[in-house]
Amino acid sequence: HFTCIVKVLFTLLYTQALVALSVKCSEEDRSAWKHVGALKKNACDAEKSYEILLSFVISELSKGKLYHEEGTQDCAMVSPIAWSPESMEKYLQDFCLPFLRITSLLQHHLFGEDLPSCQEEEEFSVLASCLGLLPAFYQTEHPFISASCLDWPVPAFDIITQWCFEIKSFTERHAEQGKALLVQESRWKLPHLLQLPENYNTIFQYYHRKTCSVCTKVPKDPAVCLVCGTFVCLKGLCCKQQSYCECVLHSQNCGAGTGIFLLINASVIIIIRGHRFCLWGSVYLDAHGEEDRDLRRGKPLYICKERYKVLEQQWISHTFDHINKRWGPHYNGL
């Protein structure tokens, strides 16, 4: 079932890559590729030829206004001379490669499949083979053609016609937004914590009298999850479920046992890891660079971006256990 889903999603992603490539091409390039592909459309391997598929995509999108918008040629990534078959194949592989990487990691996590090792130039074909996008008897070509990984669940030209119709309809309603979506590159961003305000007083004033969404009361010790922004009661018996207090329960649901909470009345960050917890410190400091735990001194506090970046990096790299030493049991009471 997993391989079936991957194959369907890959056909969609590959079509998206063809559309993005066609938008980046000049009018002359589109006309040339449209003519070349039309001559080969009846070939037996038409559904696994990027030339024929690109030609069909261009033909379908030419019926709309996408290519006729003013400034379309400004989207060209390189000069028309540089769009050789080799450079186009490289563009298609680069467009799809992030999907193959993420999907391989997911397959490894779900089924324990070994992650393959390979040279950089072989990465696409190796990952595609690992994910079952290539048949078992497939012989690696030189150069490798990414379209050989396509396995259409329905006739390719029928479903591409439908997808292109949706694109034409969308771009007619939202011309600039549609074009921007088509030409943008794939960007896979790292996860990040919440973006906090510069002044701590902004947080304190907002959350100090805020009611909890579970018990509808103002918490005695309010806290905020820095991963998702959920407002919780620290040590609140009012929100206790099955012997778990709200912060511990939220850390299991939000972070698989890892929780990062900002204690509103103390300006301190607490880390929960499984059955243990530790006080990480504060990312808000006064004008002298000192913490004001429990807000006893009442000094204005400002965010220390360097500290917050360190906290975020420890979260991303899963190094809380190795770096923070003062851990203690929380007995599900946080």
Image (cartoon, helix red, strand yellow):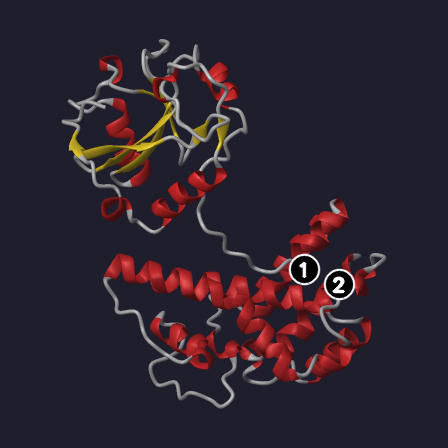
Describe the element under mark 2 as helix, strand or loop. Answer: helix
Vertical placement of 301 versus 255: above or below? above
**Res 220 → quadrant:** top left
- Residue 192 lies left or right of residue 257; in this view the side is right
Counting other residues with Cα less than 10 Å from the Cα at mark 1, is it few (<14), some (14-19), or many (20 or more)? some
**In this figure, which residue is indicated by the disc labeled 1?**
183
Vertical placement of 86 versus 276: above or below? below
Vertical placement of 158 versus 93: above or below? above
Q: Amino acid at mark 2?
A: Cys
Regarding residue 317, the answer to whether it shows in the image is: yes
**In this figure, which residue is indicated by the disc labeled 2?**
75
Percent position of residue 21, x then y: 66, 68
Regarding residue 154, the answer to whether it shows in the image is: no
Q: Nearer the viewer, residue 13 or 299?
A: 299
Residue at screen point 40% across, 36% down: 227
Q: Quadrant of the N terminus?
A: bottom left
Q: Nearer the viewer, residue 221 or 100?
A: 221
Which residue appears farthest toward the right when viewing the image? Answer: 70
**Res 224 → quadrant:** top left
Q: Amino acid at mark 1?
A: Val
Percent position of residue 238, x then y: 25, 12
Q: Quadrant of the C terminus?
A: top left
3D distance between C-alphas at marks 2 and 1 = 7 Å
Percent position of residue 241, x then y: 21, 21
Describe the element under mark 1 as helix, strand or loop. Answer: helix
Mark 2 and mark 1 residues within 8 Å of each other at the beta carbon: yes
Counting other residues with Cα less than 10 Å from the Cα at mark 2, is it few (<14), some (14-19), or many (20 or more)? some
Residue at screen point 49% across, 90% down: 142
Circle number at residue 282? none
Vertical placement of 172 versus 225: above or below? below
